[in-house]
Amino acid sequence: MAVSSKPALAHFCTVSGFLSGNLSHHDDRHYCGGRSPGYWMNHVTPEMKTRTFREVFGDVWRGKYGKWSGDPTLYEVLKMTGHDDRYQFGAHAVAAFQNALEFSDYPMSVDEVVDIVAQVLAFGYYTSPGTGQTLDAQDVVGFFYQTFDA
């Protein structure tokens, strides 16, 4: 039986860990402490119903057709489906933001989540400061997804 330390597991919960794709641990489940968009749909905070996506991230995700109608709240973004939220980028961004806000052991800070999402909104990709590698919106969804335990 192997014992895993939190710092070692945290490697899999970071952008650099995601980008490195360490092949020796692909069959292991790593717990990063986050909750999924579905969890947050069922555990809505009052702020999620009043704070807009633009307030948090500085812009709106344009989805498939180039724009959202209006200025949706975080909760409204969680409820979007299909072409309104391509790749479910908005929903995953909201979930990662809520995780960073609510859980002290989540591997990213609020500022880190906001930076990742804001870069994708502004440039179409996030650039990892450590490696210079980029993640597009679909890649960021994959990264955020791996930080969700439930």
Image (spheres, rainbow, N blue to C red):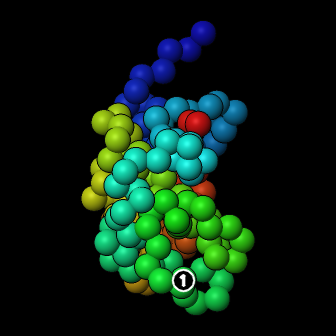
Residue most toward the top? Answer: 1
> In the structure shown, which secondary structural element does the residue marked by tag 1 occupy?
loop
Give the vertical position of 145 relative to 50 (above or below): above
118 horizontally vs 143: left or right: left
Q: Nearer the viewer, residue 68 or 119?
A: 68
Residue most toward the bottom? Answer: 66
Residue 148 visible to an observer of this rendering: no
Q: In x, y percent, where is residue 97?
A: 39, 54
Which residue corresponds to the image point at 34% horizontal and 41% vertical from the top-left?
A: 102
Residue most toward the left? Answer: 111
What is the number of callouts on the image? 1
Mark 1 residue type: Trp
Q: In x, y percent, where is residue 73?
A: 44, 67
Q: In x, y percent, where is residue 150?
A: 58, 36
Q: Nearer the viewer, residue 20 or 82?
A: 82
Res 57 quadrant in image: bottom left
Which residue corresponds to the image point at 34% horizontal and 55% vertical from the top-left?
A: 47
10 Å crowding of disc 1: few (<14), some (14-19), many (20+): some
Which residue corresponds to the image point at 56% horizontal and 43% vertical from the top-left?
A: 42
Give the vertical position of 25 relative to 125 (above or below): above
Res 51 quadrant in image: bottom left
Q: In x, y percent, where is residue 36?
A: 56, 46
127 horizontally vs 147: left or right: left
Name the quadrant of the N terminus.
top right
119 horizontally vs 89: left or right: left
Q: Nearer the viewer, residue 143 or 104?
A: 104
Give the vertical position of 137 relative to 13 (above or below): below
79 horizontally vs 70: left or right: right
Question: Which residue lies under the disc numbered 1?
Answer: 68
Residue 7 visible to an observer of this rendering: yes
